[in-house]
Amino acid sequence: MSDQLVLTSFKICPYVQRAVIALKEKQVPYTIQYINPYEDNPDWFKAISPLGKVPVLQVNDRPVFESAIILEYLEEVYAPHLHPGDPLTKASHRAWMEFSSDLLVRQFQMNNAPDAEAFEKAKTAFSDGLKRLGEQLNPTGPYFTGTELSLVDVACAPLLMRLDFMERHFKINVETAERIQQWSEALLARSSVKQSVVPEFEDLMLEFLKKRGSFFMKA
């Protein structure tokens, strides 16, 4: 009997999106349920999420929390395996996945900046980090290590989707190398990434930015 997987999500959370992409790449059956962690969370969610955050993956009712841990669990249990076999290379990939988590925080601060001054400060921090990440890309691409998708790509796809969203809607000029653009286009074209968000994702993002007081929504 196969495991019963239930993923608890917030519809625009990039960390949840990582788990969804991995599940789809591995073609693992799962169900998904949504909450809004910015509102009062139900008692059942508090019981399974010690940090009060999404995602939480329940495996036969046993919760696994934190996106990086969920990705590692899925990688250990389900094929195809997206981590490299070499231990040192694998450790390097895990380190850059952690770096991308920090970069998501910088991106959040940039997108939700209350005014132009805060935006420029956050944009500088984000751009510096994105450049550093881009320097690690295989020069031929299209993915992080070359022609094969890796778990680093899965972890970074939500970051690149939100960068694309902000550029299209608000003309944010975050200078990116051609190689990063190639990487973004390759990942955003994958069906697992396209299907990793709800159909109303962009409308929800705009609504969220408005509620957060982002200065982009005040113009």
Image (cartoon, rainbow, N blue to C red):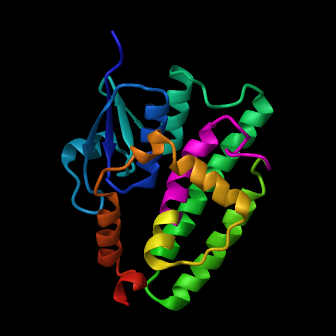
Q: Nearest the camera: 149 or 83? A: 149
Extreme residue in the top direction: 1
Is 4 drawn above or below residue 54 in the view shown? above
At a point 79% along the width and 34% down the height, the residue shown is: 88
Residue 34: x, y in percent?
25, 47
Corner quadrant of residue 195: top left
Q: Is residue 147 magenta?
A: yes
| Residue at horizontal 35 percent and vertical 88 percent from the top | 218
* Residue 147, x across and y down, in percent: 70, 37
The image quarter containing residue 75 is top right
Q: Can I make out residue 66 in this image?
A: no
Q: Please give the range of residues in magenta.
A: 139-163
- The vertical placement of 1 against 54, above or below, is above
Asked whether residue 19 is drawn in magenta, I would say no
Please report the residue visible at 31 percent of the width from the left and 50 percent of the height from the top.
198
Q: Along the horizontal axis of the image, is 36 left or right of 90?
A: left
